[in-house]
Amino acid sequence: MSYELAFWSGGDELDPLEVYRRLDAEPMEPVPGLRAIDPAEVDRAIVEVLEGWTRDGIHLHPPGVEIGSAPVFEMHIGRHIARFFGYGIEEGDHFNAIIDVMRPLGYRLFDPQTNERFG
């Protein structure tokens, strides 16, 4: 089972579900009112914030987890959306760690499972 965390910046006046659907369908297309994601900025934040985590390409492993096994987050960066798919994640702390990477960069969480965007 997987769980997705989606992040974007801007578009606060837009319907978050509609924004998510648009970004889900065309992650590299421009969306007026949203700030473009700088993948290098996200990469730096991952290194700084996720101390003890390992990265294998698009996969992020919490401390103590072998590469190629779960729990793991699969990361996808589009033009305006950063998506983290958690597989085998059961602890809230792991989800909070990803949120702690993105929040200081100005990206707000959208939870596609509940269709809710958080401040």
Image (cartoon, grey):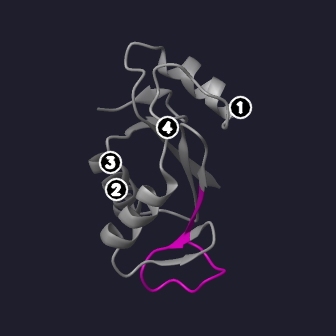
User: Residue under circle 4?
Assistant: 36
Q: Earlier in the sequence, mark 4 or mark 2?
A: 4
Q: Are marks 4 and 1 in contact (CB under 8 Å)?
A: no
Res. 96 mark: 2
SS at mark 1 in the image: loop
Q: Are marks 3 and 4 in contact (CB under 8 Å)?
A: no
Q: The disc labelled 4 sits on which kind of residue?
A: Ala
The C terminus - image quarter = top left
Q: The disc labelled 3 sits on which kind of residue?
A: Leu
The residues bearing labels 4 and 1 have C-alpha atoms spaced at a distance of 14 Å
The x, y position of residue 76, in whole percent, is 61, 53
Q: Earlier in the sequence, mark 1 or mark 2?
A: 1
User: Residue under circle 1?
Assistant: 26
Q: Main secondary structure of the magenta part?
A: loop
Q: Give the residue displayed 31% in from the left and 47% down from the top.
A: 103
Q: Give the residue displayed 57% in from the left and 23% down from the top.
A: 31
- Point out the stretch of residues depicted in magenta: 60-75
The residues bearing labels 1 and 2 have C-alpha atoms spaced at a distance of 27 Å
SS at mark 2 in the image: helix
Q: Residues within 10 Å of mark 2 (few under 14, many from 20)?
A: few
Residue 69 magenta-drawn? yes
User: Residue under circle 3?
Assistant: 105
Residue 112 occupies quadrant: top right
Q: Earlier in the sequence, mark 3 or mark 1?
A: 1
Q: Are marks 3 and 1 in contact (CB under 8 Å)?
A: no
